Amino acid sequence: MATTDNPYRVGAEPIQQLIVTTGNDVAGHRITKYLAIVRGIVVRSPSFGKSFIGAFRSLGGGNIKEFVEVCEQGRHEAYEMMIAHAQELGADAIVGMRYDATEFYQGTTEVLAYGTAVRIEPEVR
């Protein structure tokens, strides 16, 4: 849901600090250097309250907003950690960005955001 402070829907990651794309290049730019694979890893589990409410709602089927909130928070934290990793390397962009999630332990999930940190410059026409 958009607010006046954040025009993006929950889960949308605005591109503010550096360019992040799921593509392998950045339109209008050329990659001058591949720096490293960067990542952000978060291991999360829902709080007792969210687990209890989510388990109760799962009996009825459908989307379970308490679990969606936990997933969105985990992805956002992993994304921010990936951005920080790229900034430490002096990257201008991250290409090939992906998310991955794996159940680490029953009820506990590892969320991974990763991509390739690169330096770019505008293409000369």
Image (cartoon, grey):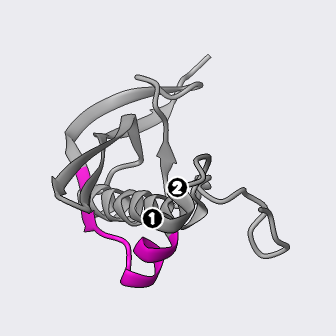
- Left/right placement of residue 124 relative to residue 23 reads right
Badge 1: few (under 14), some or many (20 or more) residues near its Cα, within 10 Å?
A: some
Residue at 37%, 58% (x, y): give it.
Answer: 83
Up the image or down, 51 lies above or below 72; here it is: below
Residue with the mark numbered 2: 59
**Residue 4 percent location from the top left of the image:** 85, 73
Secondary structure found at label 1: helix
**Magenta segment range?**
39-53
Point 30% across, 55% down: residue: 86
Residue type highlighted by circle 2: Leu
Residue projecting furthest to the top: 125
Q: CA distance from mark 1 to mark 2?
A: 7 Å
Task: Say which quarter of the image contains residue 64.
Answer: bottom right
Residue 14 location in percent, x, y?
Answer: 62, 55
Whether 80 is among the magenta residues is no
Q: Quadrant of the C terminus?
A: top right
* Quadrant of the rendering where the N terminus is positioned: bottom right
Residue 61 picture location, percent across and down: 58, 47
Q: Say whether marks 1 and 2 touch (CB < 8 Å).
A: yes
Of badges 1 and 2, the one in the foreground is: 2
**What residue does disc 1 label?**
55
Question: Residue 117, which numbered label?
Answer: none
